[in-house]
Image: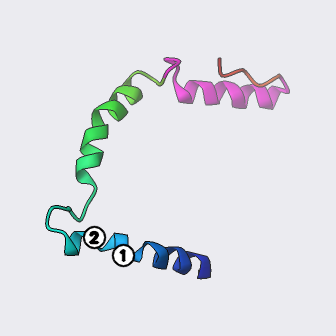
Amino acid sequence: MRALAKNLLKLWPALWTFADTTDVEPTNNAAERGLRAAVIYRKLSLGRQRRSLYAYLAEVLTAKARGDPVPALT
């Protein structure tokens, strides 16, 4: 708790910038909206390998249960 409070005190002035500066919004919604298209694309394209994460995890768990080597990510 002490470390959290210490870090929070370091950031305290930045946390309230929106109250002092009229052009600063109190949320990061603009940044999130800017990234949304890329995040959705990545989700729909199943990442760079075009593999389902869930299928890969199922392969890993099955291999581990059988004592087989864990399948590679590539």
- The structure residue drawn at horizontal position 85% and vertical position 27%, both measured from the top left corner, is 67
Q: CA distance from mark 2 to mark 1?
A: 7 Å
- The structure residue drawn at horizontal position 54% and vertical position 28%, both measured from the top left corner, is 53
Q: Locate the N terminus by quadrant.
A: bottom right
Placement of 70 over or under 27, stated as above or below: above
Between residue 12 and residue 1, name the one nearer to us: 12
- The structure residue drawn at horizontal position 53% and vertical position 18%, both measured from the top left corner, is 49
Secondary-structure class at tag 2: helix
What amino acid type is highlighted by mark number 2? Thr
Q: Position of residue 17 (x, y in %)?
A: 27, 70
Please state the extent of the stretch shown in magenta in the rendering. Answer: 48-68
Residue highlighted by disc 2: 17
Placement of 34 over or under 69, stated as above or below: below
Question: Overall secondary structure of the magenta stretch?
Answer: helix
Placement of 60 over or under 51, stated as above or below: below
Horizontal arrangement in the rendering, residue 1 relative to residue 61 (left or right): left
Q: Which quadrant of the structure image shows residue 4?
A: bottom right
Crowd around label 2: few <14 · some 14–19 · many ≥20 (10 Å): some
- The structure residue drawn at horizontal position 29% and vertical position 46%, both measured from the top left corner, is 32
Q: Which disc, if any, is residue 13? A: 1
Secondary-structure class at tag 1: helix
